[in-house]
Amino acid sequence: MRALRVHSYGEPGDALVLDTDVQVPEPGPGQLRVRVAAAALGLPDVLLCRGTYQFRPEPPFSPGMEAAGVVTAAGDAGSAHLLGQRVVGVPVLPDGALGGECIVAIRNAYPIPDIVGDVAAVASHIAGTTAHIALHRRAELQPGETLLVHAGAGGTGSAAIQLGRIAGARVIATAGSAERAAVCRELGAEIAIDTSTEDIVAAVHDATGGRGVDIVFDPVGGDTFHASRRCIASEGRILLIGFAAGDFQTIPATDVLLHNYSVLGVYVGAYAGDDAGREFMLGVHADLMRWIETGDFRPLVSAEITPAEAPAALERLRDRQVVGRVVVCPERPKA
């Protein structure tokens, strides 16, 4: 099979090689093999290429943390009924989504309804699941509350804007340019703050009459997190989604106490360890698929590309030049 593989660690443009004669992986117990129809790119793929991700597979390996496609083999006889079914999930490294076929643990494989395409399913998987868990499970978002979404034109932020709107929240978003701010408004944000020309704190206070926001969805960290502390309402909740800015901030406990707010971590992997977590995640996935079917949630996909184009796309993602998600497909989409 064909597969993009890392042979030596480095930046994606140097590290990724398109190999044309790679052995098809075999699933072990509790695993499925999936023929990849669509793979969504993300920052973890850049880190995998560099060898700086939390998991460090030995080269050669295929990165790719989100795959959608058809099950072609099962590691257990009891899972044979899944053959031929379309699923989406997080592959097991070293056989990631940027290979022609990948390995996915059965507990991490989620069914794709016939009406939902592979691109929409894979583009919504981690981003939509993260936004859903953050807003509903962790923050317990209520209709009428005000939600501030940072990096609203990104993959996870764009999902949070739409899921916040579905939940009946008033959504304020931030973005790094006027063009990205316009994308946030198109997604449903009532107010979009262009951080290249506007101050976040002043703009939020102006939009809320000085009260602040009830919930902050923050995948950025660094200075953005500290700005959030200055515009959170009493009894508000700040959701820590990630640290795209590269800074692991220190949270001043006295500020949390005196301003009466909560800081909540959001780690999707925490729900994957037992049967109760699996049932919960299946419910989250069912919600996302239903909202895609009804058109309430449209995963923001800025490009569908071939595997050969993936190294350059990952470098654009690294440099924050990507809006929404970029999805790799085995063949270039037809015009």
Image (cartoon, rainbow, N blue to C red):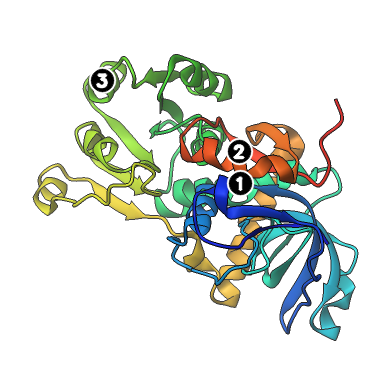
Q: Identify the mark at residue 199; answer none if there is no mark.
A: 3
**In front: 269, or 314?**
314
Residue 303, position as x, y percentages in the image: 68, 32
Image depth: mark 1 or mark 3 in front:
1
Above or below, comparing residue 202 to residue 69 in the picture = above
Q: Residue at x 67, y 54 (%)?
A: 17
Which residue is label 2 attached to? 313
Residue 221, position as x, y percentages in the image: 31, 43
**In front: 200, or 216?**
200
Residue 182, position as x, y percentages in the image: 51, 16
Tell me the CA gap for discs 2 and 1. 8 Å
Which residue is label 1 attached to? 41
Sequence-wise, the earlier of marks 2 and 1 is: 1
Above or below, comparing residue 158 to residue 276 in the picture = above
Quarter of the picture holding the N terminus: bottom right
Q: Is the C-beta separation of discs 2 and 1 under 8 Å?
A: yes
